[in-house]
Image: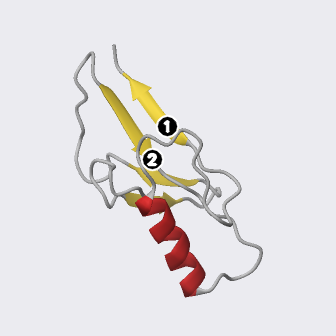
């Protein structure tokens, strides 16, 4: 899931034949991050046992989108892991 506060929201996601997957912040255009600035990207991954309902997926997506940017220990009902990624360029 992509957090609406991310630059380039909604971002492209990809999957590969070797089971790799992820968000692609630079999929459509190159990005520049100035020295001394930071970039914080927020994504969540929801793993399901079986096929989830569209209502469940929509609820989790809405819950994640509504999270405050400054929450350090985010949790969403039904998600076991949710991490913030912050890159500092100094």
Disc assigned to residue 12: none
**Is 9 positioned to the left or the right of 43 in the image?**
left
Residue at 42% over, 50% down: 68
Q: CA distance from mark 1 to mark 2?
A: 6 Å
In the image, taking residue 34 as reference, residue 50 lies left or right, namely right
- Give the image quarter of residue 73: top right
Observer-nearest of 8 and 79:
79
Residue drawn at the location 55% of the way across and 85% of the way down: 55
**Does residue 34 appear left or right of residue 1 in this picture?**
left
Q: Residue furthest right?
A: 49
Residue that appears at 42% across and 61% down:
66
- Residue placed at 22% from the left, 23% from the top? 34
- With respect to residue 15, does 48 lie above or below? below
Q: Position of residue 52 (x, y in %)?
A: 66, 81
Mark 1 vs 2, N-terminal side: 2
Label 1 neighbour load within 10 Å: few <14, some 14-19, many 20+: few
Instruction: Name the residue beneath numbered marker 1.
Output: 85
The x, y position of residue 29, in whole percent, is 22, 48
Disc 2 marks which residue? 42
Image side of residue 44 versus residue 48, left or right: left
Farthest residue in the top direction?
A: 90
């Amino acid at each position: 899931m992509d957090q609406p506060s991310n630059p380039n929201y909604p971002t492209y996601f990809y999957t590969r034949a070797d089971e790799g997957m992820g968000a692609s912040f630079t999929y459509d255009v190159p990005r520049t991050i100035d020295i001394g600035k930071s970039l914080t990207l927020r994504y969540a991954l929801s793993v399901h046992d079986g096929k989830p309902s569209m209502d469940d997926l929509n609820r989790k997506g809405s819950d994640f989108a509504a999270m405050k940017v400054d929450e350090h220990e985010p949790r969403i009902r039904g998600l076991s892991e949710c991490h913030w990624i912050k890159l500092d360029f100094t």
